Image (cartoon, helix red, strand yellow):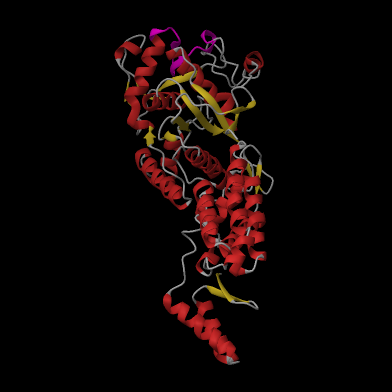
Amino acid sequence: MTLKLHNTRTNSLENFVPQNDSEVLLYTCGPTVYSDLTVGNWVAYIAWDTLVRVLRHEGYAVRRVMNITDVGHLTSDEDEGEDKLEKGARRENKTAWQIAELYSEKFLDGMNKLNLLPPEHMARATDFIDEQVALITTLKEKGYTYEIADGIYFDTSKFPNYANFARLNVDAQKAGARVTYNSEKKNASDFALWKFTPAGQKRDMEWELPIHLIENGTVKPGFPGWHLECSAMAMHFLGNTLDIHTGGIDHIPVHHTNEIAQSEAANGQRFSNYWIHNNHLKVDGTKISKSLGNGYTLDDLSKKGFTTMDYRMFVLQSHYQSEGNFTFDNLAAAQNRLKRWKNVAVLRHQIHDTLSSDETKNDDTGVSVLATSGAIVEALRDNLNTPEALKIIDEAFARIEASPLHLVHRFSLIELLKNIDNTLGLQLIDTTPDISDAQKRLLLERIQARANRDWQRSDEIRDALFEDGITLKDTNAKTLWQYM
């Protein structure tokens, strides 16, 4: 089965065909680093990590760029309001540079805890000011820009396909913007390529544009527009045309529409062949909002006894295009599911491939387990259908649990676990190491104590292992250990 992805550009499910048979050029919209990311923010990064894992499984090398927006993202997400970094600096009595560094490090730490594959290029907007200025220069030379009191803008009326990507009604957009719309702009949809620092103000982050870009030749400090950053960095590393550009559905009508306009106006080429967007996550059925106090962070989950892998499992239980709903009950269900999977994973330490010749002839456990790996991949090839992949794993693990332990094929189980970890990133192998030799000796002693009907010693050993985070499950054939 060919990898299929839902392409926002065509609003259809398409076979994925990259420009190069061996390499995929991928750009991921990254965070604006002015505060901690919430459970809603992290959904996208788990989705795109799954995408990268599937692409690699398909044999592609993936050259991915992820931006870190550390300047220029205004509170309106468009061209009005305060820079979010400046706002964060005022909130915490730090400089904007300090805020950017603090929350960039927190983001990278969160990526590591969630087992997200690092991109080949992590690009901070403030490191690519020259590239952004160069893009403005190109757009001005081609007649797409104009200057007003607060900045340099892109004239969307000169880009005929502006409304196509998001299927916008530009006339309605203009009518609806009469109150808040900057009256100096030529069109309501025009967007800032560069914003000037307001007169009398001094920003932590500001740069001077070359004189040739200023209409009256007066030096004006300022900062790049949010949309400009992504185009400049994507094209710097990946060229004029990307294979895939990812982001949230909230990026479609403004941010990604503007990226397309400025990039294609500058180069005359399609900016990205595939656009993949994830849906929102609500909390208790409502939008995540600071005023509601429901913007839970990874640290908040940890304080309530949940791991980052519990949260990753929770996210994978929903399709990336579906609107999710976070509740602590739903997270607890994901935690229990992951615990069941880990209990199957530890069986690899307790079984051996020592089937008799007759058992080998009649054993289909190994075959069915290996077939599960193929079924998982088929589900993920179908537009990253993680809920279906998880269902397939549930069914396979149920078959393993129902089988006599001596008939479970150890090598096949290990290969299945590797496949799950490689494609879904749940770290089943890394989080389920074998017990120590000392603990194994205690377990053997307990088995002997039970054989001798020494129930007191048996219970003492069980309690000692429990203190180490290990529980025991006695069956007619064998005593099995599990992690708590």
- Give the quadrant of residue 2: top right
Q: Quadrant of the N terminus?
A: top right
Task: For the C terminus, give its image quadrant.
Answer: bottom right
Residue drawn where x is 57% and y is 19% of the image? 181
Q: Nearer the viewer, residue 351 or 398?
A: 351
Q: Is residue 155 magenta?
A: yes
Q: Can residue 13 be seen by looking at this rendering?
A: yes
Q: Is residue 150 above or below residue 120?
A: above
Q: Position of residue 273 (x, y in %)?
A: 52, 23
Q: Is residue 105 above or below residue 461?
A: above
Residue 461's x, y, as percent? 52, 84
Q: Quadrant of residue 252?
A: top right
Front residue of this view, candidates 134 and 467: 467
**Residue 280 is inside the magenta segment:** no
Q: In front here: 372 or 86? A: 372
Q: Is residue 68 visible?
A: no
**Image coords of residue 267 (percent x, y):** 43, 14
83 displayed left or right of 13: left
Left or right: 236, with 3 as reference point: left
Q: Write the residue at 52% across / 13% down.
A: 185
Q: Position of residue 370 (x, y in %)?
A: 57, 52
Q: Which residues are magenta?
A: 141-159
